[in-house]
Image: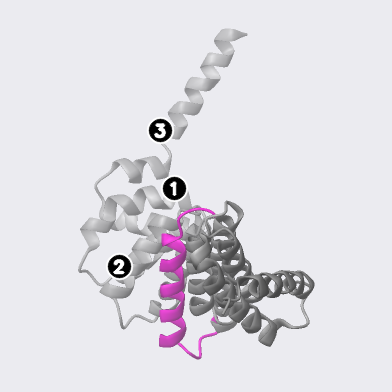
Amino acid sequence: MRIGFLFLVCISILFASCSPYQEVYRGDNAPAKYAFADSLYTIGKYKKALKLMEQIVPLYRGKPQAEKLMFNYANTFYQMGDHYLAGYQFERFETTYPKSDSVEIAAYRSAKSYYELSPRYSLDQEDTNKALEKLQAYINKYPNTEYRTEANVLVAELRGKLELKDIKVAQQYLHISDYKPAIEAFDNFIADHPGSKFRKDAFFGRFKAEYELAINSVPRLVRERLVTAKEYYNSFKKYYNETELMEEANEILIDIDKRLIKEEPTS
């Protein structure tokens, strides 16, 4: 039984080694490799197609067939989920073939590849920022593209991720009682994200951080910081008077007013 099994394995290896794909792959016939890679790519056999493409990409550089080959090469990485190489190769395609009929889809898939590389909000957001830059550049360059709606959705999602990271950082400073960095982080958030759904949290957080800073300050700084906290309360109330945070804000304001009365200079 064992001998029969080994025989079948050997026969399978022999036939595999003699397959048309293996013959082309091991051979030196570049046009045959090009044609075989193209046929495999067309039917979605990307892994096998890629092995052949990797052999012939350098050979076809500068030739008429290179444009199609280079697009397929980049798109093969995209279809296989290798977004880092897909983004890079599509960028190269854009640069090399700016007048190609495929340059718009290459630009979009390059940007979308960086979108796919964007990590969860708590990690470094370099790839998120690059994806935003690429997507916005794409929308600006191709305002009437069929992918505009989808691209705008991706942009909104990435911006939301950056906003979430920034508000969490500011709130963490507040949570650990590091009030000055908290106030600065909330200030930066308000300036950097004018349309964010977390904007009310930033206004409230800045107010609360200034209040906590005031009541934990040395005596000579308490009054000045309480006055600043009250100004931040007024800014919060101006925009978010109807929010669920208003009740807590009003409780803090009552305490501020009591403390300010005690802090009034005696004549």
Density class for disc 2 (Cα within 10 Å; few <14, some 14-19, many ≥20) is some
Q: Residue at (72%, 72%) from the top-left corner?
A: 249
Indicate the position of residue 7 as horizontal and vertical percent values: 52, 16
Identify the magenta region.
Answer: 122-147
Q: Residue 184 carries which label?
A: none
Work out how far the residue at label 1 is from the one at label 2, CA to CA, in angstroms.
Answer: 22 Å
The local secondary structure at tag 1 comes to helix
Going by the numbered disc 1, the residue's amino acid type is Lys
Q: Is residue 139 magenta?
A: yes
Q: In which quarter of the image is the C terminus?
A: bottom right
In this picture, is 99 found above or below 258? Answer: below
Q: Which mark is residue 92?
A: 2
Q: Mark 3 points at which residue?
A: 17
- Between 236 and 58, the residue placed more toward the observer is 236
Answer whether labels 3 and 1 touch (C-beta < 8 Å). no
Indicate the position of residue 127 as horizontal and vertical percent values: 43, 61
Q: Residue at (28%, 43%) from the top-left corner?
A: 27
